[in-house]
Amino acid sequence: MTTAPLNDLEISGLRVTFDGFTAVDGVSLRVGPGDLRFLIGPNGAGKTTLVDAVTGLAPATGSVRFGPEELLGRPVHRIARLGIGRTFQTATVFEQLTVLQNLDIAAGAGRGPHTLLRRRRGIPDEVARALDAVGLTAVRDRPAGTLAHGQKQWLEIGMLLVQDVQLMLLDEPVAGMSHEEREHTGQLLRRIGRDRTIVVIEHDMDFMRTFATSVTVLHAGRVLSEGTVAEVRADPRVQEVYLGETAAPAGAEVEA
């Protein structure tokens, strides 16, 4: 259970430009703990670029604050030290090392590279809690490279948990997963999102409809719509621009 203060992510007038092309164009949004925010939109809408800006990987103007801290202008490692972490579309784990060793490294247990490879008698509490949270206790001694696709994604989330990350930015965490794996992942995000701030970039509309607390729709680098799943699905602009449909008659349900 985290003891860190609960903070909002507040983005104001965020703009990212590459060689004259504006990828993120004045985006403003606010996400607080317990609000499982899904960020959706067509390819090229600026979703991943926005996350890159928040985590220091893309130069940007405007303001990005997490709690009292301004993130823009800080190097990547200093942003990470503020309790901010992300995952990518492809899981980045040490495949030759075991699940437990991956979590040890992420936890910064202070053990050298040789001792990391030795079997240990005890497991730090934060590592044990992360193993239990992501459902990987039974496979803790297996090399990460032998895990199923979904398990690798859960391990990556576990690596954020052992660092006590308070702002998680997850890029398509259920891509390529089975139905059962998607369900497990959604329930996991609900549990850990109670006392963390989580933003999920996602294309899986079924997953979004089931687990999102709120949704922000990006289009051409700008916020097109924002609200609950029902509000966003009913927005004629979303139906036309993102879903490729004309506005539905009043009372009709939009299939997102």
Image: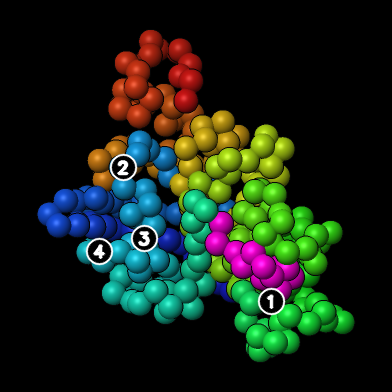
Return the x and y of residue 16 as percentages of the image width and height: 23, 57
Label annotation for residue 45: 2
Q: Which residue is mark 1?
A: 104
Amino acid beneath label 1: Asp
Instruction: Please tell me how crowded label 1 is: few (under 14), some (14-19), or many (20+) other residues with Cα within 10 Å.
Output: many
Q: Earlier in the sequence, mark 2 or mark 4?
A: 2
Cα–Cα span, label 3 and label 2 = 13 Å
**SS of the residue under disc 4:** loop
Q: Secondary structure at mark 3?
A: helix
Give the number of the mark in front: 4 or 1. Answer: 1
Q: Quadrant of residue 95?
A: bottom right
* Mark 1 or 2, closer to the camera: 1
Distance from the alpha carbon under mark 1 to that under mark 2: 36 Å
Q: Are marks 4 and 1 in contact (CB under 8 Å)?
A: no
The mark nearer the N terminus, 4 or 1, is 4
Residue interval drawn in magenta: 91-102
Q: Picture coordinates of residue 67 (x, y %)?
A: 44, 69
Residue 46 disc label: none
Q: Earlier in the sequence, mark 1 or mark 2?
A: 2
Compared to residue 229, the image places residue 158 above or below, namely below
